[in-house]
Amino acid sequence: MYTQGLDQSGKGDPGARGEETAAQLDVFQARIDAEEKIEAKDWMPEAYRRTLIRQISQHAHSEIIGMQPEGNWLTRAPTLKRKAILLAKVQDEAGHGLYLYSAAETLGVSRDEMVGDLLSGKAKYSSIFNYPTLTWADIGAIGWLVDGAAIMNQIPLCRCSYGPYSRAMVRVCKEESFHQRQGYELMLTLCRGTAEQKAMAQDALNRFWWPALMMFGPNDASSSHSAQSMAWKIKRFSNDELRQKFIDVTVPQAEFLGLTVPDDKLTFNKESGHYEHSDIDWQEFFDVIAGNGPCNKQRMAKRRKAQDDGAWVREAARAHAEKKAARSAAA
Ligand SMILES: [Fe+2]
Ligand SMILES: [Fe+2]
């Protein structure tokens, strides 16, 4: 789900870039400007390739790690219907991870390398998944807010200049839209339930509101590499623009639920047509990114265990592929 915020570096390998001529770069930029899609086998600047590998792999890692906070409630869903919905959603997230790893592989990076970077801590994933899911209402809040924020980020990625990423995003966005709706419907059910259920929904909103706003990444002023991603049409809108869009559509949804957004300074500015809000606690964001969020260690430990526990599957698949290759060579 998450894509923005961590992936603004746009840095390339200066050694590799040395090979690139001004003429090549001009032709490439002209293709981008003409809204042509760049495909895996096309020439591309090394920095473009690296930026995409970083962004797509971080996106893939976020989908996979993002299965954990919700997976935590699969065995405790209150009804069979809720369980089936949640199971489908968590499986969708696994699928998103797989599409995205495949899209990144087209850029010449291996799955093993990407997973290795995640497990070593070199690669990041969205900070939102380092927060715990303490109550059932958190499942509603995640669908509504986290998948809602993901949609804001990802709809423009359907028009990303890199073909394989943009095409993967089309299906991902359709599924994210189902995720958002199931979360909102869950919140609505709680808010129309008992006072205790409504209080649980309010508490979930209180805890997830600010981390959801942080999903869009740092303020534009401190996001120095966004300009290059915009010029390459990897990004279409700035972090602050997307965050504002999200706030503008989500606040009325909270009002409809009868919940209070946890921000004393939240006001609607009639002139601009936008909500104004308090400053975000960026220190919290950077602390969580640095590994000091409430669940970072737990998330990584679980991911490492899953990787170790799945080793026999990878070995068996490899042995099967070798046998099959040997058989077709002999035939
Ligand atoms: Fe997803
Ligand atoms: Fe999702």
Image (spheres, rainbow, N blue to C red):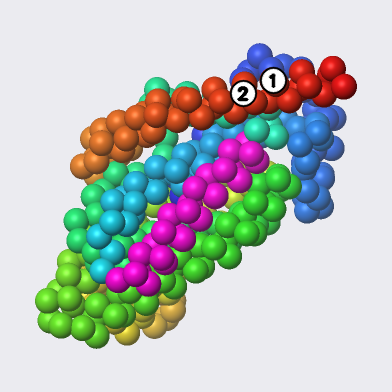
Total marks in image: 2
- Front residue of 295/325: it is 325
Q: Are marks 2 and 1 in contact (CB under 8 Å)?
A: yes
Question: Looking at numbered disc 1 in the image, what kind of residue is underneath it?
Answer: Glu
Left or right of 72: which side holds 98?
A: right
Image coords of residue 213 (percent x, y):
35, 58
Image coords of residue 208 (percent x, y):
27, 59
Under circle 1, the secondary element is: helix
- Front residue of 196/16: it is 196
Q: Disc 2 versus disc 1: distance between alpha carbons?
A: 6 Å
Q: Main secondary structure of the magenta part?
A: helix
In this figure, which residue is indicated by the disc labeled 1? Answer: 322
Q: Is residue 92 magenta?
A: yes
Image coords of residue 110 (percent x, y):
61, 26
Say which quarter of the image contains residue 89.
bottom left
Determine the residue positioned at 26% across, 33% down. Answer: 297
The residue range painted magenta reads 79-104
**Category of crowding for the residue at label 2, using alpha-carbon neighbours closer than 10 angstroms: few (below 14), some (14–19), many (at least 20):** few
Determine the residue positioned at 69% across, 53% down. Answer: 167
The answer to whether residue 144 is above or below residue 58 is below
The answer to whether residue 69 is above or below residue 245 is above
Residue 318's label in the rendered image is: 2
The answer to whether residue 272 is above or below residue 59 is below
Q: Is residue 228 magenta?
A: no
Left or right of 277: which side holds 9?
A: right
Residue 95's label in the rendered image is: none
Question: Looking at numbered disc 2 in the image, what kind of residue is underneath it?
Answer: Arg
- Front residue of 316/13: it is 316
